[in-house]
Image (cartoon, rainbow, N blue to C red):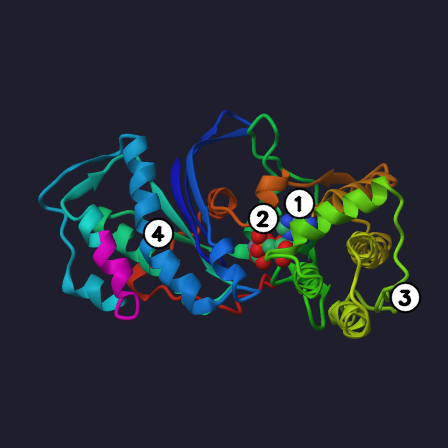
Amino acid sequence: MRILSIETSCDETAVALLSFSDTGGSVACQVLGEKLYSQAEKHAAYGGVYPNLAKREHQHNLPHLTHDLLQELNLLSDDPSVLCTDEMASWCDRDQDLFNTAKELFEKKAVHGIDRIAVTRGPGLSPALWVGINAAKLYAALWNIPIIPINHMEGHIVAALLSRDKCLITPAYPLLALLVSGGHTQLVLSESANKYQILGGTVDDAAGEAFDKVARLLGLPYPGGPEIARLAKEARKRDLTSSVSLPRPMSKDETYNVSFAGLKTAVRTVAEKTAFSEDEKKALARELEDAVTETLLAKLQRAIEAYHPRSVVLSGGVAANEHVRTAVKTLVQSYPSVDYYQPTARQATDNAVMIGVAAYRRQNVTDNPANLTADPNLSLAT
Ligand code: KG4
Ligand code: ZN
């Protein structure tokens, strides 16, 4: 089974081709090719993701990335019968550039060796998601390939279930997932594959958002997470500690919710009064990393004690953070009966491989692809 997967929920335009083979008991997953273009630099001027810019970038880049991928893998050939129709054009009335670019690249081209198209349906930025959905619909119609719509957060969870030797891991259930990204922070309980219950989440800013917003206050470029991690690492090496102590909001209450907006407010209050020295910025980055990590750990530990999961997954863009990774891994490994999974740092942030893996596990082909819609608020809860 070969799956072409598409991810455009935020500011990464990503497409991948995965090949799965069930070798009696274990499933091997080979990434035949992957193209990922990060728009981060383009959004840096706005200090965060600007949805309409994301949409414009996806529209132009996604067909080109798809074309490069398929071309490099030698999967395209000439076929005069492959034509764009008025109906296809009508799906893209708000994504004209996508339609025109796809038409230019793919009309009169047949594709070989693709069994399914997987695409992120939500959650995410509506204009950005729609580009992926419309591209999937175009490809599906041009080449007569079924579509599997995917929840982006499920993609993050299963990104951790791809082993180093490229096999799909079948985790023991119940599985508890700590999802920490720029748009979401959630603790999710999964009693069995494809079944999810949201135990709690952020009541305001997501963990990645806290990193991004504090980074901005410190004059660091977007996305702030990797910058904060870099400064914090230096502060740890030189044992720099901040004169500012940030709150660990809601870490002692009875819920599984967290709140990170107070971190940015606390930093802003100090920033308005004093200019930070370079060393103080590093120390503050360390304090921020500690505050976010300790808050996450408190909630994760509460959930482990209450639900006795057999597996724990850490994922989402913030799971690329070394300090968070080490702290969460150490906590989970203190429970010997619990298996721990985290994606590689590269697969923690948005990518298309995770969407393809989720699609293989789901195999839920959509009945009526022409009616497929994006859902910016799509929930994991089932
Ligand atoms: O999962 P993701 O790529 O996109 C969303 O679905 O939101 O997560 C992006 C978030 C950004 O907020 C970014 O600053 C954060 O992940 N991030 C990090 C690191 N790398 C990315 N945060 C902390 N440390 C990192 N090393
Ligand atoms: Zn994400």
Residue 251, given in percent of the width and then of the height, sits at 86, 64
Marks 3 and 1, the one that precedes in the sequence = 3
Q: CA distance from mark 3 to mark 1?
A: 26 Å
Q: Which residue is mark 3?
A: 252
In this view of the protein, which residue sits in the foreground, 259 or 43?
43
Sequence-wise, the earlier of marks 1 and 2 is 1
* Start-end of magenta stretch: 92-102
Q: Is mark 1 within 8 Å of ligand 1?
A: yes
| Pointer 1 residue | 320
Circles 3, 4 touching at the beta carbon (< 8 Å): no
Q: Nearer the viewer, mark 3 or mark 2?
A: 2
For mark 4, what is the residue?
61
**Residues at marks 1 and 2 touching, judged by CB atoms closer than 8 Å:** yes
Q: Earlier in the sequence, mark 4 or mark 2?
A: 4
- Residue 356: x and y in percent read 46, 44
- What residue is shown with label 2? 349
Q: Secondary structure at mark 2?
A: loop
Mark 3 or 1, which is nearer the eye?
Answer: 1
| Residue 182, horizontal then vertical, whole percent | 62, 59
**Mark 3 or 4: the one toward you:** 4
99 lies above or below 233: below
**Mark 3 vs mark 4: which is more N-terminal?**
4
The one nearer the camera, 286 or 29, is 286
Residue visible at 25% across and 65% down?
96
The residue type indicated by label 3 comes to: Lys
Q: 169 and 142: which one is in front? A: 142
* Residue drawn at the location 74% of the way across and 71% of the way down: 261
How many numbered tags mark residues here?
A: 4
Local secondary structure at mark 4: helix
For marks 1 and 4 on the same chain, the one whose residue lies earlier in the sequence: 4
